[in-house]
Image: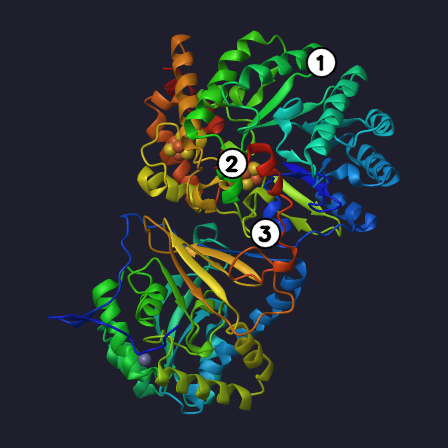
Amino acid sequence: MRRTEPSLKADANRGYSLPRLPRMDFVLPEFLRSMWVSDEARLRWQPRIESISTAWREMEWLTVVEGVRPCVLCSVSTDGWSELRNRSKKQGLTVVPLMVQRSMSKGSAAANPSAMIMRAVIGRRRDAKRFARAWANLDCAEAGALLGYPECCCRFFADAMRQSADQEMLWTVAARSYTTGAESRLLRVDGHPELNIFWRYLGVKAVPHIPCNLNCADSLHLAEQFAGVGRSAGQEDAIAWTSEILRWPLEWSVLHGIAEMKTPIVKLCTNSVATRSRFTIRKSGSAYPEDGARGVDFPFQQQTAVRTSRFTDGLHIIYGTGQ
Amino acid sequence: MTVELRPLGVHCNIACQYCYQNPQRSAGNVRAHYDMGRMKQALEEEGTDFRLFGGEPLLLPEDALEELWAFGLDRFGSNGIQTNGTLINERHIELFRKYQVAVGISCDGPGELSDIRWAGSLAATREATARTEDAIERLCKAGMPPALILTLHRSNATPDKLPVLEQWLHSLEQIGVNTVRLHILEVDDPQVRAKCSLTTEENIAAFLFFARAEEGFRTLRFDVFDEMRRLLLGDDGGTTCIWRACDPYTTSAVRGVEGQGQRSNCGRTNKDGVDFVKAEFPGFERYLALFHTDREAGGCNGCRFFLMCKGQCPGTSIDGDWRNRTEHCEVWMALFQRFEDGLRQAGKAPLSTHPIRAQLESWFLDAWTRGENPNMETFLAANRAQFEG
Ligand code: SF4
Ligand code: SF4
Ligand SMILES: [Zn+2]
């Protein structure tokens, strides 16, 4: 497989056009549900994933305290609001609210319509105010720069919003990360593990943003800075688990507005673009968890030794060897 | 809801070419160890009667069977088993009687008609089938006629075989069998599909054959036809899971309890060969999506039978992808059409052509969006006057 800088088609107006998934004209409500491959895998990994999410929120905030970047965008429940404001104030940071949105904590937004969360930006007063203005003006470049995102990724994000806000960002990024498969319905990608963006559904990530492609060097640098801040703050376990998880193989696919992601330990489904046919991304991995499942196909580890013709060898006797 | 207890997982004594559990076997996920204490604890937690399931559950030692059924009768008042029937002996029959075990037997017909329930060689296969036939007779003689599951395929349901199968069912009716569930062959393996599957036209012809033949039976019923007729009249209480907008992440109609007490889903959705643990919350996205997706793209948009069928069992979806409708759509549609005609001729107003259908569809879409899975009956009871005109 070749890893290259993105291959982009020329476009007279915008410089290039992004890959698009052909879509139908309906949108499913928001949902996110998951099933574990075994109780053992759930007991081991669910608490780890939860602690990764908690550690990540802290790391995001700490990168602003440590001056790695000017601002952080965060989501906070109404209960956690005053605590966040107080501890930010102690570090000389201001919290500026941006919007209120529904929480997706119970499988489907519709199942729990009353849970609300606040989106807010935190930074030094001047930076936070500048961010709030950029947010209101939909100025992706300025907002992205204040969040410390690489310039190439900000440019990509702005283009993606302009050209295909109704598209599936995971597909757009994967299709740009692999030159020869971009028009196919099956993309096989690898890319830097730290830029594996598929686990974001469960809050596992090494960068705060959507990178412009799965090999973006500037994003990789940002991932290293985040991990450095996390380690200094005693988050070694969360960083090691994140690094391990992001190295596992996974398959993501979308059909009829439902995306499904299969990983060695958990499978999940969520709302996405309503495509007429199935589009699949297979992300290769360099590690497999001990308690990962055995299955018959990618991304599961296959036990070729036990594959047997026991179920089919009678066919030739019953029906003969022809079709 | 059925609790399926699988002490030996998918471990089986024969190797049906078409078994939907084969992906799990191919993946090497066959756990043939059980822990009686853990299983009982899990069953207590489920709190309802259970059915012994496999693989082949009669591979369990007789004292283990007795212990489980004594427990089942004591706690829940009844027992059940689904078996291929090849291992049933006199002691089993005694146990069935003593512990009130309702027996379901999977068998595809007499002699060569069951050849794809492969037992290693042709002679062993025929011998196994003969043992199943014999077990059915012995159970009937003992006053415990089993319910049959009969899967239709090239060995038993081509035009030349159908009359043989019908004849066999008449002979079973005479000795007391009165419930038969017809299954369409569910195929995961392309080799099996090519060899064993009926074409869509052959499947339709076979099902229509039995729909016509049904009148010639006195007591024996094909329950799938009864359900389809009831569904067309909005009577969906108690219909089986395949018509009930089954969520493949929770398969609420089937709760599996495995040998170590682990909970699992219905194995029909198990295309990866992985025995997933149930998701925490149900969701009905498949049904919202199928309603809006046109038929060429694998959906059900515009189908007047959607309320009854809902794209059918996700374990039978096109390409093994639960987001598609069933790959047997044409068969179900042809049958719904036939029963719809029959009902109209009998002066009844099937829902499929009733003016209330659009309203009922929106009511379902709203409920699914809220994460609920209602009954048609509930809506129709509240709108009885409009429904009955
Ligand atoms: S997957 Fe199919 S057989 Fe299994 S519970 Fe759902 S509808 Fe029933
Ligand atoms: S008959 Fe076919 S199109 Fe109609 S609801 Fe059933 S599967 Fe969908
Ligand atoms: Zn970049």
B348 lies left or right of A172: right
Residue B96: image location, x then y, percent: 81, 27
Residue A239 vs residue B177, the one in the foreground:
B177
State which tag comes first along the sequence, 3 or 2: 2
| CA neighbours of label 3 inside 10 A, class few (<14), some (14 to 19), many (20+) | many
Of the two numbered discs 3 and 2 in the rendering, the one whose residue sits closer to the viewer: 2
Mark 1 falls within which chain? B
Residue B266: image location, x then y, percent: 60, 43
Q: Is residue A253 above or below residue B40?
A: below
Q: Amino acid at mark 1?
A: Gly
Dot 2: element: helix
State which tag comes first along the sequence, 1 or 3: 1
Q: Are marks 3 and 2 in contact (CB under 8 Å)?
A: no
Q: Are marks 1 and 2 in contact (CB under 8 Å)?
A: no
Residues marked 1 and 3, same chain: yes
Q: At x 61% / y 64%, what residue is drawn?
A: A292
Residue topped by disc 3: B273
Q: Kindly tell me whether residue B83 is visible in this rendering.
A: no
